[in-house]
């Protein structure tokens, strides 16, 4: 778990002084800015490292913020991008070639790539803090009056790095991290009057979890399944399904709270984990470290998992950025695999309205930068509205929907319209996409980024800037070792985006089949 000690009064005051500069430094990444500006990108996944290791190739996820190179469209912006291991040159060239309206060589001259040369499981930010000479090198390239830091998520590590470098960070104050946990999310939903599943308070031991879950079960006697969630799980990997149906007969007529607690202790050993490597023994230990809650599992014949994304600017303004339908997998459909943009018209404006209210609540609490809210939508034929919505959690960081949307903006230079929830190019053409971090097959192992480019160019699937359609890739460093790739397919209709996605998969499958021994 990333440590979260409270700052000293001096540290807190220094950090607030730095953050006050953001109002003058910050501009939206898609807005032309002719000022001298320096941006330090630290794509550290400063989350619980044990949870992150459940994700194949997670050490390559530092590549997902390479779409931040969009800022190099501004002619006087300089950008420093730091990673744990050096980036393959062809990957960097790929992103620079995507930049519209500026020669890639001009952008490359203003880009500095640095690496800690450390493949350990520590967060990248910790690796930087442990290397004073590298910090000195970075500090020497930053003008405190013109520089700020961008990160994937914010913890005390990122705050310490900002203080060490003397630059503000365009991210949440880590003292507010509670509002992005499972327990904090539920509190905000209640404050905003947002519908959400019945659940338990946050607890720190399995005994406490059994106690509060028994109370939940008693007030919801008809519930069939519950979800047990680690307070800081990632991409659904920290969730487990608790099926109460095998124990229904045992509780009929029970009035004793302690009898239900005893049944739950037994049921916990039979949890259905979303991460295949998880066991009750290891999960139990994480409850002590991370804390956990239990919630009613939302049942329904037709269910979807939409999400809404927003941003709180340094000026305190709340902007809606996008909506998505999440593509989920895993044993019970709780693990994030990808997304499609925008969310279904049946509920996208409704979740956007709720996302706006949640953003305003967060802004009043002092939150900053990107946030996302996940929902469950259940179809109720014959009712108005036809979809019932339940808010599930808030993410106070960039997420799996951030980089595909950044790719869309980078490649099309269009704008999101909150009025109808669609994205339009400058010519008024709506655009749609399907994206995934998990295009993964064993047969893809051994493919190099250059092989991928050969295949995509020969099949004419590369993004076409004239037509405004095609495929954009990320996580290319994952491909050779894990057979895993990130893909955003952009089309003129949702079915067109799906078609491009399928054509990419078909092209890769055919290529590896030809070369198979």
Image: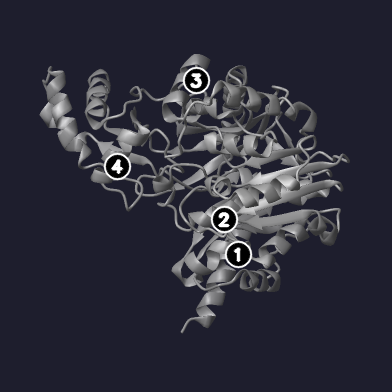
Per the image, the residue denoted by label 2 is 84
Disc assigned to residue 503: 1
Q: CA distance from mark 2 to mark 4?
A: 28 Å
Q: CA distance from mark 3 to mark 4?
A: 26 Å
Mark 3, secondary structure of its residue:
helix
Judge by depth and name the residue closer to the eye, 288 or 491: 288
Judge by depth and name the residue closer to the eye, 70 or 344: 70
Judge by depth and name the residue closer to the eye, 422 or 277: 277
Foreground: disc 3 or disc 4? 4
Specify which label sits upstream in the sequence, 1 or 3: 3
Per the image, the residue denoted by label 3 is 188
Mark 4, secondary structure of its residue:
helix
Q: How is the image coloured?
A: one colour
Judge whether residue 221 can be spotted in this image: no
Query: Marks 3 and 2: in contact by CB < 8 Å?
Result: no
Specify which label sits upstream in the sequence, 2 or 4: 2
Residue drawn where x is 56% and y is 70% of the image: 508
Specify which label sits upstream in the sequence, 1 or 2: 2
Per the image, the residue denoted by label 4 is 283
- Relative side of 194 to 426, left or right: left
Locate the N terminus and report the quarter of the image it occupies.
Answer: top left
Q: CA distance from mark 1 to mark 3?
A: 42 Å
Mark 2, secondary structure of its residue:
loop
């Amino acid at each position: 778990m990333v440590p979260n000690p409270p700052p000293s009064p001096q540290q807190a005051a220094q950090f607030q002084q730095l953050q006050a500069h953001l109002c003058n430094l910050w501009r939206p990444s898609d807005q032309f800015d002719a000022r001298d500006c320096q941006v330090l990108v630290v794509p550290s996944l400063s989350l619980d490292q044990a949870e992150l290791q459940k994700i194949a190739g997670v050490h390559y996820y530092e590549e997902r913020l390479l779409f931040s190179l969009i800022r190099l469209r501004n002619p006087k912006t300089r950008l420093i991008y730091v990673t744990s291991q050096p980036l393959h040159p062809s990957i960097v060239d790929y992103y620079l070639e995507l930049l519209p309206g500026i020669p890639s060589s001009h952008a490359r001259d203003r880009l500095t790539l640095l690496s800690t040369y450390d493949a350990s499981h520590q967060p990248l930010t910790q690796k930087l803090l442990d290397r004073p000479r590298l910090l000195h090198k970075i500090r020497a390239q930053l003008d405190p009056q013109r520089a700020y830091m961008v990160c994937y998520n914010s913890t005390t590590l990122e705050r310490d790095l900002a203080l060490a470098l003397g630059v503000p960070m365009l991210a949440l104050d880590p003292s507010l991290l509670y509002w992005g946990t499972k327990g904090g999310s539920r509190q905000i939903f209640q404050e905003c009057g947002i519908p959400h599943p019945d659940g338990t308070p946050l607890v720190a031991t399995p005994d406490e979890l059994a106690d509060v879950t028994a109370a939940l079960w008693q007030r919801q006697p008809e519930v069939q399944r519950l979800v047990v969630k680690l307070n800081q799980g990632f991409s659904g990997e920290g969730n487990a399904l608790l099926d109460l149906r095998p124990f229904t007969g045992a509780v009929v007529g029970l009035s004793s709270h302690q009898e239900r607690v005893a049944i739950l202790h037994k049921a916990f050993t039979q949890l259905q984990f979303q991460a295949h490597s998880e066991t009750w023994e290891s999960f139990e230990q994480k409850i002590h470290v991370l804390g956990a809650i239990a919630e009613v599992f939302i049942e329904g014949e037709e269910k979807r998992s939409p999400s809404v994304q927003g941003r709180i600017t340094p000026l305190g303004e709340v902007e809606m950025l996008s909506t998505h339908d999440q593509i989920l997998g895993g044993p019970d459909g709780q693990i994030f695999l990808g997304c499609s943009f925008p969310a279904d018209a049946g509920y996208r404006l409704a979740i956007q309205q709720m996302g706006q209210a949640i953003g305003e609540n967060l802004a009043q609490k002092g939150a900053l930068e990107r946030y996302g809210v996940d929902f469950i939508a259940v179809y109720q034929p014959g009712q108005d509205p036809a979809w019932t919505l339940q808010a599930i959690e808030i993410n106070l960081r960039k997420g799996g929907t951030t980089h595909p949307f950044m790719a869309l903006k980078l490649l099309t230079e269009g704008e999101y319209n909150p009025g109808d929830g669609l994205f339009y190019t400058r010519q008024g053409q709506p655009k749609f996409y399907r994206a995934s971090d998990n295009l993964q097959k064993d047969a893809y192992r051994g493919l190099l980024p250059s092989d991928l480019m050969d295949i995509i160019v020969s099949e004419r699937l590369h993004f076409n800037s004239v037509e405004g359609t095609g495929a954009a890739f990320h996580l290319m460093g994952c491909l050779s070792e894990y057979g895993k790739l990130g893909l955003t397919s952009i089309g003129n209709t949702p079915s067109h985006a799906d078609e491009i996605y399928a054509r990419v998969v078909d092209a890769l499958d055919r290529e590896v089949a030809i070369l198979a021994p």
